[in-house]
Amino acid sequence: MKKTMKSIIAATLALVMLLCSVPAFAYNTGDTVEWLVSRYEYMDSYLYAGELKVGNNTVTCEKNNICCNINVDKAGYYLFTGDEMGDVYISENIQPDGSPQGYIDVLEVYESEKNESVVYLPEGESFIGFYTNDSTDKTEITVSYFDEEITAVEFEENSFKDLIFWEDYWISPTDDGEKIGMYRDAKITFSNGSVYEVCFGKFAFDYEMISENEYNLTVILPGYTEEFIMTCCEVKDVVKNVEITNIDKYLNSVLFYDNTACSAFEDDALKNEKMTLTFVDGSTYTIDSIYDFVDYVDFPNGRGYEMFIFDVVEENGSVKLVVEIAEQSVAEFECKVRKASFFENLSVLADNITENLNLIKYEYDMFTCVLNAEDADVNEIVESIKNLIDIIKRESADVYEKVINFADFYINGGN
């Protein structure tokens, strides 16, 4: 009897272990998949579109954010291609209930017409998430085995020289500690000799600080590591001087009651002037026509950075023209300030109130569209009425506060 009971218990335990090894939940096409982004403890939602196989697949897209699962017998790098397939996301692991968790880095080819990604897949099951165009009903996705391992990674020249924080690289937390991330061009060679070119691909690195401006980096790719030395700096360490032709005639500002200003250099008034940047190494860069926003200013490190020109109003009422590159100030010019007249301030108040009224009008137009729709739904109409009332209350309160602030300015001696 005891022997029989032990056999029953053993069989039961074996059955339980077998059941535990199988996900507790299997998705059906059209189900919503809650993808846990573990580090931030929030969910990304995808529509499940079935299982992918190695080879050609036709995937139905009822929404533009869809996911599939795939089972592979051999771990390694796989190539995903698809005309309508956008960025690809791969699960880091699968939770006991069968849902995906976390994202792994993907070797995507950005700025390319090929829409392809090389992804390392572990043996067994993974989830693949991606986005398609809203108008896409079906998309063709091809999955093919690429190779087992990487043998070399060649980054573009000066990829790690004189980098600027947040513009060229960033530091972010991961489940394995902080990593340095950056987008770079690279040529990746695999063990079969094939070369995969990554254009503006996302790479992650382990790092160790050598000094304040120098780091030891280790690139993190499945089955491959390599060390690099990264140097970094601030923009002020690169730009020595900034000159703008005829700048003095643009350094005039009108200060309004709400502590905003209108300056002579705004609205691309500097487009007929030139700016010359002199770098610490003695080289120069000239902008022949200055606008409030310049896409890229070329630096000696071979990279370009966005430039903005804007005014800054200090608490004491002074105004400065600020030239900012890579979100760091490289030059400031003091402006002559004139306080706005009563009617100039009144005009600003009217413009500010008009913004509130336009928001109310927009919501009213949305309400009339819902109300006049042929297939108008009662719940939608009620929801639209609620939204309209809410925005009227909110914007009316904002208008009241603006009028009070205007009145207080003059009551308290503003001029």
Image (tube, grey):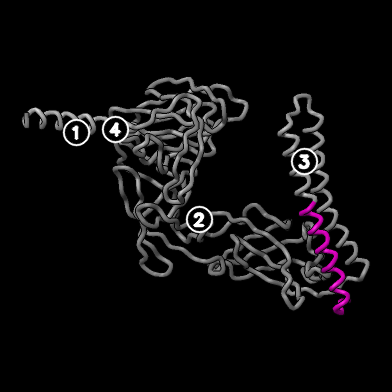
Counting from the top left corner in percent of width and height, residue 52 is at 41, 24
Which numbered circle lies on residue 123?
4
Counting from the top left corner in percent of width and height, residue 282 is at 56, 67
Task: Name the amino acid type tagged 4.
Answer: Glu
Residue appearing at x 48%, y 29% in the figure: 48
Q: Report if residue 398 lies within the magenta region.
A: yes
Query: Which of disc 3 and disc 2 is earlier in sequence?
Result: 2
Whether the residues at callouts 4 and 3 have beta carbons within 8 Å, the answer is no
Q: Quadrant of residue 152?
A: top left
Q: Nearer the viewer, residue 381 or 340?
A: 381
Whether the residues at callouts 1 and 4 have beta carbons within 8 Å, the answer is no
Query: Which of disc 1 and disc 2 is earlier in sequence?
Result: 1
Mark whose residue sits in front, 4 or 2: 4
The residue carrying pointer 4 sits among few (fewer than 14), some (14 to 19) or many (20 or more) residues within 10 Å by Cα, namely: few
Query: Circle 3 is placed at which residue position?
Result: 385
Mark whose residue sits in front, 4 or 3: 3
Counting from the top left corner in percent of width and height, residue 113 is at 54, 31
- State the CA–CA distance, disc 4 to disc 2: 34 Å
Q: Nearer the viewer, residue 330 or 12?
A: 12
Image-based side of 333 in relation to 196, left or right: right
Which quadrant, please, contains the C terminus? bottom right
Residue appearing at x 42%, y 47% in the figure: 38
- State the CA–CA distance, disc 2 to disc 1: 55 Å
Q: Nearer the viewer, residue 106 or 132?
A: 132
Query: Circle 2 is placed at which residue position?
Result: 168
Query: Circle 1 is placed at which residue position?
Result: 13
Task: Name the amino acid type tagged 1.
Answer: Leu
The residue carrying pointer 1 sits among few (fewer than 14), some (14 to 19) or many (20 or more) residues within 10 Å by Cα, namely: few
Task: Name the amino acid type tagged 2.
Answer: Asp
The residue range painted magenta reads: 393-415
- State the CA–CA distance, disc 4 to disc 3: 54 Å
Task: Name the amino acid type tagged 3.
Answer: Ile
